[in-house]
Image: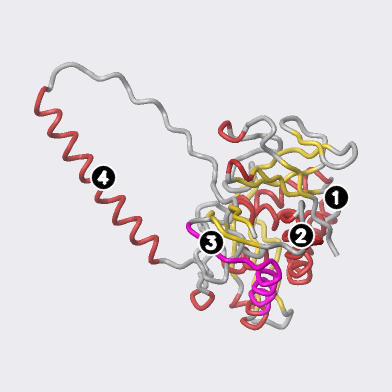
């Protein structure tokens, strides 16, 4: 048994350097700064408390409202599991990609949701997973998974979630066929969708390995870096795009890797295949673009995911 740490940190936002201090104002300026700072700190604390009390992974309180700030949208449809599930139970997503705006819905029944969680719990038991402080945990992987533990975890999750995500990837496939999208175009469409899923570290007791199953990420509307990266891998592989998880355990981060001829940062996998880095925690990152704080030599490992 050993300690491990699950990834989950998003890239830091750009913060402009403070302007040089101005002369004058004296004590009045100091007092005003302290008052404003105290007010902002109070607001931040109130916001943090409010956010911590909101459980985005609470299946009984699914927010079904489509964001209204992306303008007129092209709907890709609604994916339901099972297919006779009431459309009113679907969670809707809307996102903008360049000049286009898209929308889709995805919903799973309570029974399916519970089954995904049960399968994930069984995987945790198989690895003798025990949660620790923060994202740290102990595990004792099976002998067959030694030296490639994360590959085993990702493949098991991909296998258990593939059937439930197939109706979702079918929405993208239909658009791919209608518009004759090439591999890069359909990848950008899927990546835009995944990037716009709310970033949040797992907070539920059912989470393990510092992540959530990909079907739960969509059904509940939030996930962290490795959870969203694996979701993108499953969808893209179901659409015929060669994709992997890129993992930097030392940096506490994970990303998507795609075997596409794009410019930017690429990492070698098995054989001669190169995978372009794709940041999935937040919107706006182009294929191949790496956040500066994660552009670290020898930090990234290609983790292949075999799909059923």
- Residue 182 at x, y = what percent? 84, 45
Residue 202 in picture, x, y percent from top left: 53, 61
Query: What kind of element bears circle 4?
Result: helix
Labels 4 & 1 near each other (Cβ < 8 A): no
Q: At which x and y percent is residue 37?
A: 23, 40
Q: Earlier in the sequence, mark 2 or mark 3?
A: 2
Identify which residue is drawn at 52% across, 71% down.
205
Secondary structure predominantly adopted by residues drawn in magenta? helix
Residues at marks 1 and 3 touching, judged by CB atoms closer than 8 Å: no
Label located before the other in sequence (4 or 1): 4
Question: Quarter of the image holding residue 152?
Answer: bottom right
Task: Specify the segment rendered in magenta.
Answer: 115-133
Mark 2 lies on residue: 152
Cα–Cα span, label 2 and label 4: 45 Å
In this orientation, which residue lies closer to the viewer: 183 or 222?
222
Left or right of 236: which side holds 71? left
Compute the Cα span from label 3 to label 4. 27 Å
Find disc 1 in the rendering and name its residue.
Answer: 180
The mark found on residue 166 in the picture is none
Mark closer to the observer (3, 4): 3
Report the residue at 60% width, 51% height from top: 225
Nearest-to-viewer mark from 2 and 3: 2
Cα separation, mark 4 vs mark 1, equals 50 Å
Give me the disc on residue 40: 4
Mark 1, secondary structure of its residue: loop
* Sooner in the amino-acid sequence: mark 2 or mark 4: 4
Q: Where is the C terminus found, in terms of image quarters?
A: bottom right
First reached walking from the N terminus: tag 1 or tag 2: 2
């Amino acid at each position: 048994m050993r300690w491990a740490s699950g990834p989950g940190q998003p890239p830091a936002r750009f913060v402009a350097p403070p302007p040089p201090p101005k002369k004058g104002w004296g004590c009045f300026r100091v007092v005003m700064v302290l008052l404003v700072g105290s007010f902002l700190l109070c607001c931040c604390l109130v916001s943090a408390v409010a956010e911590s009390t909101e459980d985005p992974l609470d299946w009984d309180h699914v927010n079904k409202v489509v964001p209204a700030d992306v303008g007129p949208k092209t709907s890709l449809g609604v994916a339901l599991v099972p297919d006779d599930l009431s459309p009113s139970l679907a969670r809707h997503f809307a996102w903008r990609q360049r000049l286009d705006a898209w929308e889709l819905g995805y919903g799973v029944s309570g029974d399916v949701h519970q089954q995904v969680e049960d399968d994930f719990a069984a995987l945790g038991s198989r690895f003798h997973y025990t949660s620790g402080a923060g994202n740290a945990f102990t595990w004792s992987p099976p002998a067959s998974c030694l030296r490639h533990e994360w590959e085993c975890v990702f493949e098991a999750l991909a296998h258990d979630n593939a059937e439930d995500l197939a109706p979702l990837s079918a929405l993208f496939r239909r658009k791919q066929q209608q518009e004759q999208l090439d591999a890069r175009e359909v990848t950008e469409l899927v990546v835009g969708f995944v990037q716009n899923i709310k970033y949040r570290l797992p907070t539920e007791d059912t989470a393990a390995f510092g992540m959530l199953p990909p079907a739960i990420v969509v059904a509940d509307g939030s996930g962290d870096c490795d959870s969203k990266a694996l979701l993108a891998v499953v969808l893209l592989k179901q659409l015929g795009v060669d994709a992997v998880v890129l993992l930097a355990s030392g940096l506490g981060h994970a990303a998507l890797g795609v075997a596409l001829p794009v410019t930017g940062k690429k990492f070698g996998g098995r054989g001669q295949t190169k995978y372009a880095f794709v940041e999935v925690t937040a919107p706006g990152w182009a294929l191949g673009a790496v956040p500066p704080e994660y552009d670290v030599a020898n930090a990234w490992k290609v983790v292949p995911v075999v799909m059923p």
